[in-house]
Image (cartoon, rainbow, N blue to C red):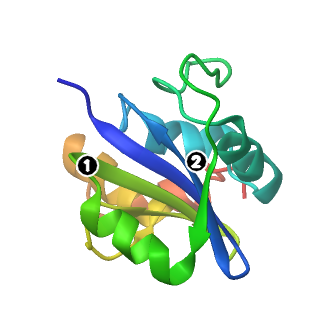
C-alpha cells in the first residue's frame, strides 16, 4: 500500500501541485527530504513544475508518470483537498516555508515543527533535546 500525497506551491492566487504516489511520510519520507534538500522557494517551484511521479528519490526527483502539472484557484484547491482519494499527506510551500496536512480538509502546520515533534516522539527526546535540534542549524537556517 502506498502513502499517497501532493506537493503544492502557492503562487499568489493559485495553487500549482503534483501527485506523489508513495513514501510521503513526514519522518524518513517526502517530508524529511523537503526539509533537508528542498527547503527554499526555487526548489519548491522546481518540484511542483516537474509533474506527477511515483516518489522523490533519495538523490534527485524524477518523473516516471504523465508529465502533468495541476493548477487551480485557492477556492478550487479546497475542493481538490476534499475530494483527494486516499491522499494521506499534503505538502504546501506557502509564506516562505513548507507546511503539511494529513490530507482532506485537515489544517496545515509548519513542516519543521511537525517533523521535530515526530522526531522527538520517535526517539523519545525531551524538550531540551528538541531545542538543541532547532538551535543546531539542523534545517540549514
Which residue in the rendered view is the most extreme toward the right? 42
Instruction: Locate the C terminus and report the quarter of the image it occupies.
Output: bottom right
Q: Residue at x 54, y 27 (%)?
A: 56
Residue, disc 2: 35
Residue, disc 1: 88
107 w.r.t. 86: above or below: below
- Mark 1: secondary structure: strand
Residue 68: give x, y in percent of width and height: 61, 38
141 w.r.t. 56: above or below: below
In front here: 12 or 33? Answer: 12
Q: What's the mark number on residue 25?
A: none
Residue 136: give x, y in percent of width and height: 61, 53
- Mark 2: secondary structure: helix
Question: Quick check: can you spot residue 133?
Answer: yes
Left or right position of 132 against 21: right
In front here: 107 or 37? Answer: 107
Left or right position of 1 against 36: left
Instruction: Locate the N terminus and report the quarter of the image it occupies.
Output: top left
Circle 2 packing at 10 Å, graded few (<14), some (14-19), many (20+), is some
The Cα atoms of the two marked residues, 2 and 1, are separated by 18 Å
Residue 26: give x, y in percent of width and height: 37, 45
Q: Residue at x 24, y 40 (%)?
A: 123
In front here: 124 or 35? Answer: 35
Residue 25: give x, y in percent of width and height: 33, 39
Q: Residue at x 37, y 38 (%)?
A: 24
Q: Residue at x 58, y 68 (%)?
A: 72
Left or right position of 131 against 46: left
Circle 1 packing at 10 Å, graded few (<14), some (14-19), many (20+), is some
Question: Quick check: can you spot residue 128?
Answer: no
In front here: 89 or 83? Answer: 83
Q: Are marks 2 and 1 in contact (CB under 8 Å)?
A: no
The image quarter containing residue 78 is bottom left
Amino acid at each position: 500500500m502506498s502513502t499517497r500525497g501532493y506537493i503544492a506551491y502557492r503562487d499568489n492566487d493559485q495553487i500549482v501541485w503534483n501527485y506523489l504516489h508513495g513514501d510521503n511520510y513526514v519522518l524518513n519520507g517526502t517530508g524529511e527530504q523537503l526539509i533537508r534538500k528542498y527547503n527554499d522557494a526555487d526548489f519548491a517551484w522546481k518540484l511542483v513544475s516537474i509533474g506527477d511521479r511515483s516518489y522523490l528519490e533519495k538523490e534527485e526527483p524524477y518523473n516516471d508518470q504523465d508529465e502533468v502539472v495541476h493548477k487551480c484557484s485557492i477556492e478550487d484547491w479546497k475542493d481538490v483537498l476534499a475530494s483527494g482519494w486516499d491522499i494521506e499527506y499534503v505538502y504546501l510551500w506557502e509564506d516562505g516555508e513548507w507546511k503539511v496536512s494529513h490530507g482532506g480538509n485537515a489544517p496545515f502546520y509548519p513542516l519543521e515543527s511537525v517533523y521535530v515533534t515526530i522526531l522527538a516522539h520517535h526517539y523519545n527526546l525531551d524538550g531540551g533535546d528538541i531545542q538543541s535540534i532547532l538551535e543546531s542549524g539542523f534545517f540549514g537556517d
